[in-house]
Image (cartoon, rainbow, N blue to C red):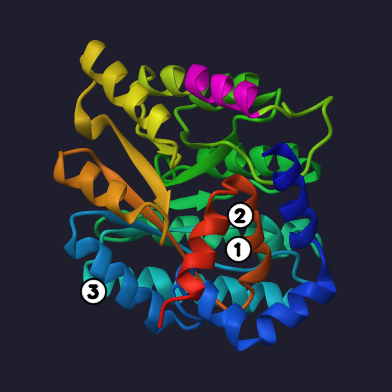
Amino acid sequence: MDVLRAFFISLSESRSLRALAERSSIGQRVSARFVAGTQVADVLQATSAVNQRGMGVSIDNLGENVTNAEEARESAQLYHQLLDEISARKLNANISLKLTHMGLDVDENLACELVSGLVAKAASSNPRNFVRVDMEGSAYTQRTLDFVHKLHRIPGNQECVGAVIQSYMRRAESDIDALLSEGIRIRLCKGAYKEPPEIAFQAKSEVDANYVKLMKILMKSGIYHGLATHDEKIINHAKAFATRENIPHDAFEFQMLYGIRRDLQRRLAKDGWRMRVYIPFGTEWYPYFMRRLAERPANVLFVARNLLRR
């Protein structure tokens, strides 16, 4: 499994394969299961459908590492449009974004300005909304966390901006301690980038064990967090822990990716657990798709079966 994971991560970084896949009809057909189209209207329709099944949504416009200020501003403007539409349509949805999509590599001050504007808009919405700052590769970890801390300290932004922590990172527990000390909401996931052994656990068993350890810290913190996993064993562990520790069903939420384990998503919602679906959209789906296969190589069989269907 670790070999397959490394293989798909390497594929996610291939520009030539990406260009081929994004142009091919087969690639577009396969991605449609996991990506809600390329336009804002597509993702709003998908969000409404998920809401009708009793689940929340986090919307992500796929893209990272923009190369100029104009691209960054366009990315931010699209998120402003999304926040407006979420409010106007009264959808149960928030937004997730990457700092490199907001121009972090181009101009850090610009990225700060753009993301600050989005968090301020979310905070002033009625009802208040929320911006999740996604985590990227380890080269961005500290800068991303510094951004979130800075944004959260701005008056009025409290509880409207949150971070992502990856359980395969050896530093994850200390990062969680720092975030919790300021009351910052966290999405806990396993991690989907290729990282060296000195900074990240390599074996699935170690990543899983750290996830469970961190999950318990978050669940007992009294802050509303998201547990992002499709691992049913870990989900059952969380449910049992919540019951044992008298943690209310509405004190945290499970989070899963659009198109993956829809049966489990619906079952959790039906059983009264908070459930949020992470819905990506946009043309730049290839790196995202490959990293999803890296996270869960069993998805390869699912995709193969999907290809055979009309």
Q: CA distance from mark 2 to mark 1?
A: 7 Å
Q: Residue at x 46, y 79 (%)?
A: 37
Q: Secondary structure at mark 1?
A: helix
Splitting the image into 4 quarters, where does residue 259 fall? bottom left
**Residue at the outermost top position:** 244
In the image, residue 38 above or below residue 50? below
In the image, residue 303 above or below residue 119? below
Amino acid type at circle 2 is: Leu
Residue with the mark numbered 1: 289
Which numbered marker is on residue 108?
Answer: none
Q: Position of residue 93 (x, y in %)?
A: 33, 60
Question: Crowding near pointer 2: few (<14 within 10 Å), some, many (20+)?
Answer: many
Q: CA distance from mark 2 to mark 3?
A: 33 Å
Foreground of the two, 253 or 82: 253
Q: Residue at x 59, y 68 (%)?
A: 62
Segment colored magenta: 204-214
Which numbered marker is on residue 293?
Answer: 2
Amino acid type at circle 1 is: Phe
Q: CA distance from mark 1 to mark 3?
A: 29 Å
